[in-house]
Amino acid sequence: MPQLVTVRVTRVNRRPVRIWVPVLPVVLVLAPVLVLAVLAAAAACRVYRISVARALGSGWRVISALPGTQLDIGLGRSAVLVTIR
């Protein structure tokens, strides 16, 4: 599971802004919403006759594979870099 998300915003003629977001506190705060999302996903799996265990397992594997991911977005002379550790 990812531990830290780093967001760096570079703007024209300004100092870059870097924000570190620890994942665990965010997950704990959003836990009630995540429970509802898992229940909704399980209901959707039942409607479309997909194995709930396999779908949740696949989702967990995607989340577990996120560390090391870098997302670089540039528009004109501004840029955003998101790094998941």
Image (spheres, rainbow, N blue to C red):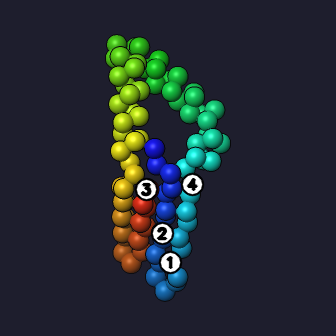
> Residue 58: horizontal and vertical position, in percent?
35, 31
Tell us which disc is closer to us: 3 or 2.
3
Tell me the residue that label 2 is attached to. Answer: 8
Callout 1: helix, strand or loop? loop
Rounded to the nearest angstrom, the CA distance separating label 2 from label 4 is: 15 Å
Tell me the residue that label 4 is attached to. Answer: 22
Count of numbered marks: 4
> Residue 77: horizontal and vertical position, in percent?
39, 78
Q: Mark 3 or mark 1, which has the lower sequence index?
A: 1
Rounded to the nearest angstrom, the CA distance separating label 3 from label 1 is: 18 Å
- Contact flag, marks 1 and 4 (Cβ < 8 Å): no
The relative height of residue 81 versus residue 34 in the rendered view (above or below) is below
Q: Quadrant of the C terminus?
A: bottom left
- Contact flag, marks 1 and 2 (Cβ < 8 Å): yes
Q: Mark 1 or mark 2, which has the lower sequence index?
A: 2
Q: Mark 1 or mark 4, which has the lower sequence index?
A: 1
Rounded to the nearest angstrom, the CA distance separating label 3 from label 2 is: 12 Å
Rounded to the nearest angstrom, the CA distance separating label 1 from label 2 is: 7 Å
Q: Mark 2 or mark 4, which has the lower sequence index?
A: 2
Tell us which disc is closer to us: 2 or 4.
4
Amino acid marked by disc 4: Pro
Amino acid marked by disc 1: Pro
Tell me the residue that label 1 is attached to. Answer: 16
